Amino acid sequence: MKLKTLADLFHHELKDIYSAETQLVKALPKMAKAATHEELKVGFEEHLEQTKGHVDRLKQIGESLGLTLTGHKCKAMEGLVEEGADLIDEDADDHVRDAGLIGAAQRVEHYEIAAYGTARALALILGHEDAASLLEETLAEEKETDEKLTELAESAINPDANAVESE
């Protein structure tokens, strides 16, 4: 895909985000299975359902603008997912693994926050208000997920992992 116009770049960004989200739909069940802290496990399961909604919103945007979103692989998300999978396979204490899973999940969230923010800005300048609104909705959810992960890390997961080191 040649990026000759801002519209081309917007299409490319949407394809990249779509690929990222579809990769996450496959990765989140593995993260939920690997998590031992119940609240973290439930959080991953809930975010899986939310992520499926993100995919649906992206499809809605693509359809409304006549854009195909398949046929691209988000290499950044592929790397983030691979790092998460490597962490799952590490020989680690359960509490320490949970702390690592939160870190991996937050790296994913930060990538998505950047991607959705960029796509939203492009949609606005291109006059795609409906698309911008849907992208903003997802952006807000990604930020909320990141905040929940921080809260869980600070209140429970990281203190539990630190207690293991002290034993």
Image (cartoon, grey):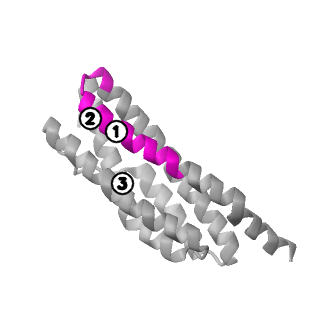
> Residue at horizontal 35%, vertical 34%?
119
> Helix, strand, or loop for circle 1?
helix
Q: Is residue 75 visible?
A: yes
State the residue position of label 2.
Answer: 131
11 within the magenta span: no
Q: Does 135 sit left or right of 71 as displayed?
A: right
User: Which dot, 1 or 3, sits closer to the camera?
Assistant: 1
135 within the magenta span: yes
Judge whether 117 appears above or below 97 on screen.
above
Q: Which residues are magenta?
A: 124-145
> Helix, strand, or loop for circle 2?
helix
> Residue at horizontal 62%, vertical 74%?
90
Q: Position of residue 159 (x, y in %)?
A: 76, 65
Q: Position of residue 149 (x, y in %)?
A: 59, 56
- Of the 4 image quadrants, the one containing the C terminus is bottom right
State the residue position of label 1.
Answer: 135
> Which corner quadrant of the image does residue 6 belong to?
top left
Q: Does 160 sit left or right of 90 as displayed?
A: right
> Residue at horizontal 33%, vertical 51%?
54
The total number of labels drawn is: 3
Q: Position of residue 41 (x, y in %)?
A: 53, 71
> Residue at horizontal 70%, vertical 77%?
93
Residue type at tag 1 = Leu
Residue type at tag 3 = Glu
Residue type at tag 2 = Ala
- Of the 4 image quadrants, the one containing the N terminus is top left
Q: Position of residue 40 (x, y in %)?
A: 56, 67
State the residue position of label 3.
Answer: 21
Foreground pick, 165 / 138: 138
